[in-house]
Image (spheres, grey):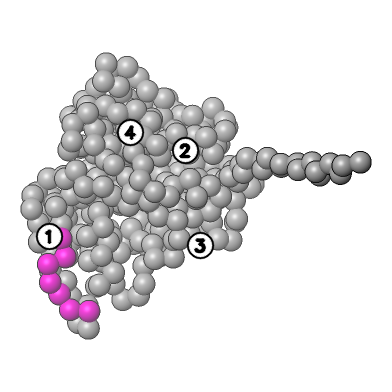
Amino acid sequence: MACQEPTTITTIPEKIIPPKPKRIILMIGDGMGLSQITATTVVAEQPLALEQFKHIGLVKTHSTKLITDSAASATAMATGKKTYNGAIAMGVDQDTLQTIVEYAETLTWKTGIVTTATVTHATPASFYGHQPSRSRVNRKIAAQFMTKDIEVLMGGGWTYFKDGLDGRDLIDEARQKGYFVTNTIEVGEYVPQKMICLVSSELPPRIKERGDFLPKATKKTIDILSQNNASFFMVVEGGQIDWGGHQNKGDYITEETIDFDKAVAHALAFAQKDKNTLVLVTADHETGGCSVAKGSLKKKEVTCAFTTDYHTGTMVPIFAYGPGATEFVGIMDNTDIFHKMKSLMN
């Protein structure tokens, strides 16, 4: 009797499901390309927190045009949709788009926004406001904030709230809604449930005047949102890296990138301890066509050269740490950031 060949059983591997974060911290260095980061590593006194990230990708930044502005690029990351330059969380047909912050609120996640620009500026505004044009809408954006359930808002723009749309005093209204409202980050160990911190009447000054507002505001926001082990989504913008690029000032770029990196360090330290937090660090676009032209490693000096005083179409990096970090490796579109975050939050 002939022997039968043994039956081979093929095991189909189960689909590996990436771990889901309980918290997401999205950090945007406005205008921060690879050259801006490279220049900063030269002049910084110690290694950047960014250098600790192991999962790194590249992001295409174009809007409906090759060269984006901050409103369209922030909208892409906030809503997953491309739009025209100048649009704040609105589509090409001027339809209102749900933002990742608004989506987080439907999941009852706590939310927060921190910036070194005004809180009504194009990048932060695109995560909670909706306007067909970014021009002269600061008071409209401030009024739209008051319709949201965002727990923390920090940056510049006191005037747009105190002297609000149609004469409204949004500072007083915010206090009535339970916000602790202040114009300084120096609030000691006090950790309120909800906080608005507006440190300048309009645009915040450079770091010499504003000090370490961004790192402190980042840490304070994490302290507020993480109370009672809550899930949260927050956005942190280093807004003035972009301004250094527009002015073609290498020292302005590097001092702002160092400041932004200190904020990254706070987020990373929390995530490393927490184990349930995804930290994403990227840029909305590159500004200035910046290149590292010359310098000295020994003297910690660098000279930047520029090709423009506006944005460029160069891809920007994205750094990821924590549950879901492997989703952000490789080349992706800026709209993918929204879809990947939303999938991980669901």
Instruction: Give the percent coordinates (x, y) of residue 233.
Output: 49, 41
Which residue does the numbered mark 1 point to in the structure image? 249
Q: Secondary structure at mark 2?
A: helix
Name the residue beneath numbered marker 2.
340
Task: Give how far apart the Cα atoms at labels 4 and 1 are.
Answer: 28 Å
x, y percent for residue 23? 54, 45
Res. 165 visible in picture: no
Q: Earlier in the sequence, mark 3 or mark 1?
A: 1
Looking at the rendered image, the quarter that the N terminus falls into is top right
- Tell me which label, 4 or 1, sits earlier in the chain: 4
* C-alpha distance separating marks 3 and 1: 31 Å
Mark with earlier residue (4, 2): 4
Q: Mark 2: which amino acid? A: Lys
Crowd band around label 1 with a 10 angstrom C-alpha radius: few (<14), some (14–19), many (20+): some
Q: Are marks 4 and 1 in contact (CB under 8 Å)?
A: no
User: What whole-number distance in Å separates the C-alpha atoms at marks 3 and 2?
Assistant: 23 Å
Q: Residues within 10 Å of mark 3 (few under 14, many from 20)?
A: few
The C terminus is located in which quarter? top right
SS category of the residue bearing label 4:
helix
Between discs 2 and 1, the one toward the N terminus: 1
